[in-house]
Amino acid sequence: MLTTPVQTTLSALDLARAGRFAEIRDLFAPQLGAGPRAVPGTVTVPRAPGPHAGVVLLAGSGSLDRDETIGRKQPLKDIAWGLASLGIATIRFDKVTYAHADELKDAHDFTLADEYLPDAIAAIKLLGSTPPWPGTVCFCSVRVSAARSPRASRPPSRRSLR
């Protein structure tokens, strides 16, 4: 018997439970990372008492903001709200190519490692060392950023930025 596939889409309203989480924008005093290429971001936290696991959300390829906004869609924001509603803290941040687009438009030596690793590592450190997060941090990433997640999660002695 043949069946017709049903396409289902979820929105932030389907995943999130109002009142179960809070968003802290631009928490990173005022940036995530250090130096001239630091980026702004958002932490989404459950309102329930901790400790909470943490998830670093990495945007895919292209010059994307922290929500991975494409038209009216904001998939990373939807994921953050859904996870926070389930008791999991998240951190997401503007990609350096979005936050510093003018500076980087002619940077021919800028690599994928430069684009992802410094900020992903800073996000790991933030979630892993700040109460109420007990140091349990993982990644949620798709497309190109999924290939960078394993390198960012390695101990510093085994990680290379190039």
Image (spheres, rainbow, N blue to C red):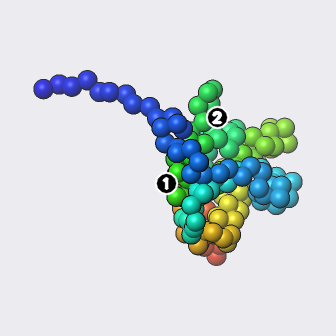
Q: What residue is drawn where x is 71% and y is 57%?
A: 119
Assign the N terminus to one quadrant of the image: top left
Q: Quadrant of residue 75?
A: top right
Residue 33 % position (x, y): 77, 59
Location of mark 2 (residue)? 69
Residue 160 % position (x, y): 65, 66
Query: Is 115 placed above or below 34 here?
Result: above
Residue 123 % position (x, y): 67, 60
Query: Is 147 placed above or below 5 here?
Result: below
Q: Nearer the viewer, mark 2 or mark 1?
A: 1
Observer-nearest of 141 and 147: 141
Q: What residue is drawn where x is 32% and y is 27%?
A: 6
Q: Secondary structure at mark 1?
A: loop
Assign the C terminus to one quadrant of the image: bottom right
**Residue 9 marker:** none
Q: CA distance from mark 2 to mark 1?
A: 23 Å
Q: For the residue marked with disc 1, what is the amino acid?
A: Leu
Closer to the chain start, of discs 2 and 1, is: 2
Q: Secondary structure at mark 2?
A: loop
Q: Quadrant of residue 73?
A: top right
Toward the bottom, the furthest residue is 157
Q: For the residue marked with disc 2, what is the amino acid?
A: Thr
Residue 100 % position (x, y): 81, 43
- The answer to whether any part of residue 47 appears in the image is yes
- The answer to whether any part of residue 151 appears in the image is no
Please state if 1 lies on the left or on the right of 85 as rendered.
Answer: left
Please state if 46 lies on the left or on the right of 125 as rendered.
Answer: left
Bin the neighbour count of mark 1 within 10 Å (Cα to Cα): few under 14, some 14-19, many 20 and up. some
Q: Count of labels shown? A: 2
Q: Quadrant of residue 122?
A: bottom right
Location of mark 1 (residue)? 86
Toward the left, the furthest residue is 1
